[in-house]
Amino acid sequence: MAIKAPLGLPALSVPSDNPLTIEVVGLGRRLFFSPVLSVDRSLSCATCHDPKRGFADRDSVSAGVHGAKGTRNTPTVLNAAYNRRQFWDGRAESLEAQVAGPMLSSIEMGHSLDSLVKSCSEDADLRESFRRAFGDGPVTLEKISKAIAGFERTLLSGNSAFDRYQYGGEKAALNDSAKHGLQVFTDPQKGNCVVCHMISSDYALFTDGGFHNLGVGLNSEGEIVDVGRFKETGRDADRGAFRTPSLRNAALTAPYMHDGSLKTLKEVVDFYVGGGSSNPYLDARIKPLTLTKEERADLIEFLVSLTGEIPTVDRTLN
């Protein structure tokens, strides 16, 4: 099964131990929309990664089973196949490694390993889907993870107005405001957003895949509440650092930042203009910006132009 990357995105890399097949992707789709993945059958992956909301959630922090909440905003699944590491803190090296986290979290989907496998094994039709995808044998966490990761690799979104302008030669695809916003975005003396939200000559992921401290989520004393990447690396330089998200489809995925604390694109732009929030580990690239009201509005118009085509997904479990 071949997946062609849309305009603006690079060729998709697929791991050799989890090739994309119609059967694997079909099973992954079923599981993504199935409540069997939550211990009380109240949630599916799509509850928080809602296709109607850019495969994200409009809440600052999503509610898990029994209404429990964590501390981090739900990132979109769109184009997650290109992430070098998964989760805000990068603790998972692949889509496959990421899948188990929410299912086995007590504040997300609430399963134990045994209850998860049991829940996926009880339905005869679902067992048959596993057999078609992976051959004979019991349902396992590895199979569940591979199936969902396979499906998620098909959730690619490109061919935005920006892509048609930048890579498709359609100079009318962007209006004048968005074109000016692109200039602000790339100008080292203006927004310089491109230093972390990168654009190449052939494609644009709008992320460097790195981890940066912006000063988001400080308490009233100016202290870092969530240490982010530091928990995984133990390096002081990573205190309060979080993965750079892609800006593709940002207009669809409010609220923003790792804690969902900024509600609008205007708030995000104003936050950066102010130079983030000072703390001992603030990334050196985060500095106050001098942008006019018009330039801020143009920058937001450019961000809106990054809204791409959203894949249509059949929710039916057949």
Image (cartoon, rainbow, N blue to C red):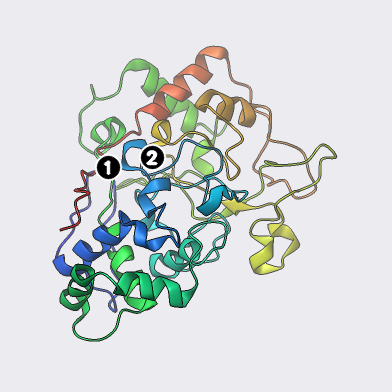
Rate crowding at label 2 as few (under 14), some (14 to 19) or many (20 or more) other CA atoms within 10 Å: many
Does the image show residue 158?
yes
Rate crowding at label 1 as few (under 14), some (14 to 19) or many (20 or more) other CA atoms within 10 Å: many
Does the image show residue 190?
no
Which residue occupies the foreground of this view, 73 or 241? 73
Q: Residue furthest bottom?
A: 137
Q: Amino acid at mark 2?
A: Arg
Callout 1: helix, strand or loop? loop
Answer above or below: position of 98 versus 296. Answer: below
Quadrant where the C terminus lies? bottom left
Which residue occupies the foreground of this view, 67 or 221? 67
Which residue occupies the foreground of this view, 213 or 316? 316
Q: What residue appears at the point 63 percent right and 22 percent down from the top-left corner?
A: 290
Residue 149: x and y in percent read: 33, 64
Q: Which residue is mark 2?
A: 248
Q: What residue appears at the point 53 percent right and 48 percent down from the top-left corner?
A: 244
In three-dimensional space, the C-alpha distance between marks 2 and 1, rounded to whole angstroms, equals: 8 Å
Q: Which residue is mark 1?
A: 158
Q: Residue furthest right?
A: 221
Q: What residue appears at the point 46 percent right and 24 percent down from the top-left corner?
A: 300
Q: Amino acid at mark 1?
A: Gly
Residue 191: x and y in percent read: 55, 30
Residue 103: x and y in percent read: 46, 64
Answer above or below: position of 181 versus 208. Answer: above
Residue 213: x and y in percent read: 67, 48
Callout 2: helix, strand or loop? loop
Name which quarter of the figure residue 263 lies in: top right
Q: What residue appears at the point 68 percent right and 64 percent down from the top-left corner?
A: 231
Name which quarter of the figure residue 157 lies in: top left
